[in-house]
Image (spheres, rainbow, N blue to C red):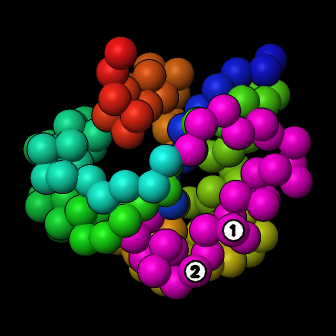
């Protein structure tokens, strides 16, 4: 089924100059970019974006990392987008991500894991509201 998802290229990848390469992977795989935006998360936006992790011990670290520099958010459309994009992204811990996945090829750590992708249609809706603004 063609559906939509969202990914965020994180500050580590933007500062390392990996934006073009990462976007190319999705284009080459046949996904269509619907909208894209470069911005820096405010603390409030980051806390909202990652709200499901609010009670986790790493929440503070997560918010300070994602607000540390510009990110690129993209909403894309294609077949089985949520599941397919998460497979392309790879495991959360860069050292456990399969070679060939984005984190497996570029990730340097747990915070520095290059990219975030929505894990469901519901999180896509919430996360794109934060990244692009709610109508
Ligand atoms: P992401 O896919 O953006 O979703 C939540 C993020 O939390 C995850 O990628 C990691 O970067 C981060 N994360 C998960 N577990 C930890 C942890 N134990 N310590 C620090 N960051 C973490």
Q: Is residue 122 left or right of residue 68?
A: right
Q: Nearer the viewer, residue 26 or 132?
A: 132
Residue 91, how many percent across, how many down?
Answer: 56, 60
Tell me what residue is drawn at x 81 percent, y 28 percent.
Answer: 79
Say if mark 1 contacts mark 2, CB within 8 Å: yes
- Out of 95 and 10, give the one closest to the viewer: 10
Foreground: 54 or 64? Answer: 64
Residue 21: in magenta span: yes
What whole-number distance in Å separates the C-alpha atoms at marks 1 and 2? 8 Å
Q: Residue at x 57, y 80 (%)?
A: 17
Mark 1 Cα-neighbour bin, 10 Å: few <14, some 14–19, many ≥20: few
Q: Quadrant of residue 98?
A: bottom right
In the picture of the structure, the residue carrying the numbered disc 1 is 20
Q: Position of residue 62 (x, y in %)?
A: 24, 61
User: Which residue is pictured at 30% across the width and 58% down the height?
Assistant: 40
Q: Which stretch appears magenta? A: 10-36
């Amino acid at each position: 089924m063609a559906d939509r998802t969202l990914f965020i290229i994180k500050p580590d990848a933007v500062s390392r100059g990996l934006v073009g390469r990462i976007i190319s992977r999705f284009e080459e795989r046949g996904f269509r970019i619907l909208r894209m935006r470069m911005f820096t998360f405010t603390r409030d936006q980051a806390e909202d974006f990652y709200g499901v992790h609010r009670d986790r011990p790493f929440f503070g670290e997560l918010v300070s990392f994602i607000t540390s520099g510009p990110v690129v958010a993209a909403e894309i459309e294609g077949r089985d987008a949520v599941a397919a994009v998460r497979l392309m992204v790879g495991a959360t811990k860069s050292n456990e991500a399969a070679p060939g996945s984005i984190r497996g090829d570029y990730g340097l750590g747990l915070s520095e894991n290059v990219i975030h992708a929505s894990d469901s249609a519901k999180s896509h809706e919430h996360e794109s509201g934060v990244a692009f603004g709610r109508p």
